[in-house]
Amino acid sequence: MSTVLKNKISKKSAKVAVIGLGYVGLPLAVNFAKAGYQVFGLDMDQDRVDQVNRKVSYISDIPTSTLAKAVRSGKLQASTDFTLIKEMDVLIICVPTPLKRKYTPDITYILSAVRTIRKHFKRNSLVILESTTYPGTTNELILPELQKGGRKVGKDFFLSFSPERIDPGNKQYDVTRIPKVVGGMTPKCGALTESLYKKIIKEIHVVSSPRAAEMTKLLENSFRIINIGWINEVAMMCHKLDIDIWEVIEAAKTKPFGFMPFYPGLGVGGHCIPDDPLYLYWKAKHHGFSSKYIKLSADTNSNMPAYAIEYLKSEMKKRKKRFAGAKILVIGATYKKDVKDLRKSPPLKLIELLQEKKCKVDYYDPIIPYLNIGQIDLTSVKLSKDVLKKFDCVITATDHTDVNWNFVLNNSRLIFDVKNIYAKKDRKNIIRF
């Protein structure tokens, strides 16, 4: 049976369904379509589906022109009709995996997708999970669900886990340039998945099992959350010791081995880094193991907006400036430079906390014209000399390229430089984080 599917993949006659057309799914769908496969993007969000079919991209990493070309070629179409699954040879699951509550993963989207697949998928199909989840999900939840009714993995269908590796806004490493890790339920499952991804990705690394692949993804992201948490703790330590943390990092970077630079800030945003390591923390606890590093790092990072406010408050007090009722301008709302993504963005938490402290807060972001999230309802101000001068302090929360930072510096009373934008500027109106 695997020979039939293998030949279809090789000849690009296999029909591919990508379930979930977000930051992971849409780039995959477009690149498989560009490679010559017939691709169907399935999503419950009618607006997303309509935008794809209208040839309008809503993902910054996929230009509208690229999406339009794929749709015009007839190789890519989107739909909310999940009964199309019965015609598919390959089904790639790219749905969200949020946290239900603190430290508890929510895999309802994955289970919903898998149950829908089970109702409709045909024999000899390849099912691939890309959504990040805890080790054991593929074996313990997806496999039993798909085997209901007597189907056997490796014989009647094929199943693998291949973790997404997306870095929004990274022009050097798009989805096709990032090596792909694959873990199949059986050797045949892994081989079929490898042969598929090789059509769009140059380097494939096959591991022994879905568990190993799931753990690989969580190792990658836990590495980052722990090191970011550590450097944030070092920054707080340096504040107490009156040492410039940025100078120390630059000095440490001169070592050609054994050191990798991480930088302090308001915490971590997006989907991967704030959430993914906590899946591992949760799973480990269920096996009687407590990951102190993950929890401590997550708590440290989530507390950074509050710490930044207290630090600013103390620095303003030294300058005999009143914090309560102060007019504050936050520059940057997104969690990452030049990326139009507000998911769990630390600057949003900063704005909320400043408002709670009774500060009069505005924001400016060249790619986010308005904010209507939670308790925040603001429109981005227009930067001008008069606007800047009315604020008691300007906070550099996101270091967007399209901000005239020299103009900000020259026309602001006081700047709290969280992103070290003014590293080479020695001005009395700069508070260094």
Image (tube, helix red, strand yellow):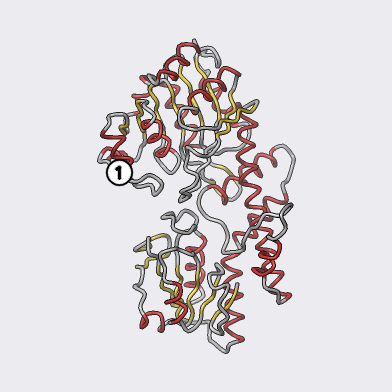
Say if 45 sits above or below 157 in the image: below
Image coordinates of residue 96 in percent, x first then y, are 47, 41
Towards the viewer: 152 or 15: 15
Image coordinates of residue 198 in percent, x first then y, are 50, 27
Q: What residue type is labelled 1?
A: Ser
Picture mark count: 1
Image coordinates of residue 359 in percent, x first then y, are 47, 77
Residue at image position (61%, 33%) is 213
Say if 291 sits above or below 72 in the image: below
Say if 423 sits above or below 134 in the image: below
Image coordinates of residue 151 in percent, x first then y, are 51, 14
Work out which residue is located at the far bottom of the displayed protein and give it. 320
Residue at image position (53%, 23%) is 159
Q: Is residue 390 left or right of residue 130?
A: left
Towards the viewer: 352 or 401: 401
The secondary structure type at the circle numbered 1 is helix
What residue did someone put label 1 on?
65
Q: In which quarter of the image is the C terminus?
A: bottom right
Towards the viewer: 388 or 99: 388
Q: Quadrant of residue 186?
A: top right
Q: In this view, does 119 lie to the left or right of 311?
A: left
Say if 396 sits above or below 280 in the image: below
Residue at image position (48%, 25%) is 196
Q: Quadrant of residue 179?
A: top right
Residue at image position (37%, 81%) is 385
Towards the viewer: 236 or 361: 236
- Bin the neighbour count of mark 1 within 10 Å (Cα to Cα): few under 14, some 14-19, many 20 and up: few
